[in-house]
Image (spheres, grey):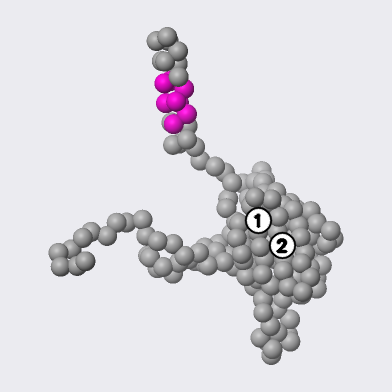
Amino acid sequence: MKTIRIVIIGIVIALIAFLIFYKTEKINIGGIWTSKEIVLDGKTLYPVKSDSLMQAKAFDIIIDDWTNSLYICNQDTIRANFTIKKDSDNKLRMKLTSSESSLNGNFRLEMDTLSFGPNAAYDVYAKLESGETLLYIQRTVYYQSQKTVLHRRGTP
């Protein structure tokens, strides 16, 4: 009975240690993104010259991590499935499969982050590029500071 208890406690401690130190290689790109530039097979979908005069709404791009799907939403919704991998040069590649022929293949994925201050937000830019197809998207992420605020006398 003691050996079973010791084995179970050992397994629980090993599991807890594994969960504490486990780092995932997967990047989190899920969410609603705003398009900065969309070019499919050399044809510019956004922004076109008429958009500057009419202030047309940008395409929304929804990336769903649960189903590994990418949706380009405007008049017609274009759907693509994706997988993200690192190549031999340790650069990110996104493989897209879609009914839209220009969204099939391996895309180079470049991510960039711009911070707005210590407690406010940051912009995340992602560029998917392959041949004559380009998806340049942006998302603003708001976050709370992890530092606790010390209580000062006289404040509620």
- For the view shown, which residue lies furthest in the left direction? 153
- Whether residue 105 can be seen here: no
The residue that appears at 69% across and 72% down in the rendered structure is 59
* Image: 2 above or below 123: above
Q: Which residues are magenta?
A: 9-16
Which residue is at 71% across, 55% downward? 69
Residue type (three-letter) at the residue carrying disc 2: Tyr
Q: Is the C-beta separation of discs 2 and 1 under 8 Å?
A: yes
Residue 47 shows in this picture: yes
Q: Residue furthest bottom?
A: 53
- Is disc 1 placed on a helix, strand or loop? strand
Q: What is the quadrant of residue 99 in the picture? A: bottom right
Residue placed under numbered mark 2 in the picture: 71
Residue 43 disc label? none
- Label at residue 64: 1
Vertically, is 28 above or below 15?
below
Indicate yes or no whether the magenta region holds residue 12.
yes
